[in-house]
Amino acid sequence: KGLTFRSLTADSAPSTGESVLLTSPVWEERSISAVHAGSSFDQRYVLVCGPGSWDLDGLSEAFPGCRSERLPFAEDEIPQSFTAAAARTFALVKEALSQPSSRRTLMQIVISPEGKGSLFRGLAGMLRTAHLESPSFMGQVIEIKSRTGNESLSRILAENATCSDPLIRYRKGIRYTQ
């Protein structure tokens, strides 16, 4: 009955010859042409997060019917910023999934690698889970430099809408996925 704890001593621990395995993410160069196309969506969200000064009105103009928002971000308050960004993203995912399942939805979150901005890659897990729950939902976290101009950002968002990679980064103009 119940749960008990006991400490293991060196002689009682199983000897399996196992050791600690440390891993790190592997980013592979992957062009858009190497992935399958299919960018017809009934609803689209573009969320930006980080020190970038991207113009949300410009994104709405580039993608008519797109809902664009800036997620909370404060370099000196990352835990609070991440919590607020995750809560807002969750609310938008929940809203998107409450629509009829026949509606195809794309949610793209743009983050910046500068400072601690890359920590917001963690939002990709929520988007992957939403896709598992509803295959008509597709989410992407796209990491680009904050000094990327609005025109380049719009082009990157449009290109990536044609693929299903959930985690994307750009370094020196080269596209990588994980």
Image (tube, rainbow, N blue to C red):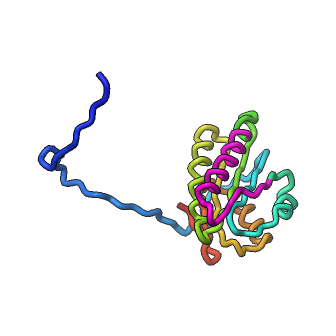
User: How many callouts does the rendering have?
Assistant: 0
**Residue 10 in view (yes/no):** yes
Residue 90 figure quarter: top right
Q: Is residue 79 left or right of residue 66?
A: left
In the picture, measured across the screen, residue 66 lies left or right of residue 138, that is right
Residue 73: image quadrant is bottom right
Outermost residue, bottom side: 172
Who is closer to the viewer here, 72 or 18?
A: 72
Q: Residue at x 83, y 57 (%)?
A: 63
Classify 25 as above or below 13: below
25 is higher (above) or lower (below) than 84: below
Residue 128's spot in the image, x, y percent? 58, 47
Q: Which residue is located at x 60 percent, y 62 percent?
A: 168
Residue at (64%, 56%) from the top-left corner? 81
Q: In the rendered image, which quarter is residue 129 located in?
A: top right
Q: Nearer the viewer, residue 155 or 34?
A: 155
Can you see residue 33?
no
**Residue, far front:** 76
Q: Position of residue 64 (x, y in %)?
A: 86, 55
Q: Residue at x 73, y 36 (%)?
A: 102
How far across and down, in percent of the image, does residue 23 sit?
A: 39, 61
Residue 89 counted in the magenta span: yes
- Residue 166 horizontal/vertical position (percent): 60, 55
Question: In the rendered view, would you say 106 is above or below 29?
Answer: above
Question: Magenta region, mostly helix, strand or loop?
Answer: helix
* 118 vs 8: above or below: below
Kindly give the residue lying farthest to the top in the view shown.
Answer: 1
The verdict on residue 102 being magenta is: no
Quadrant holding the N terminus: top left
- Image: magenta residue range: 68-95
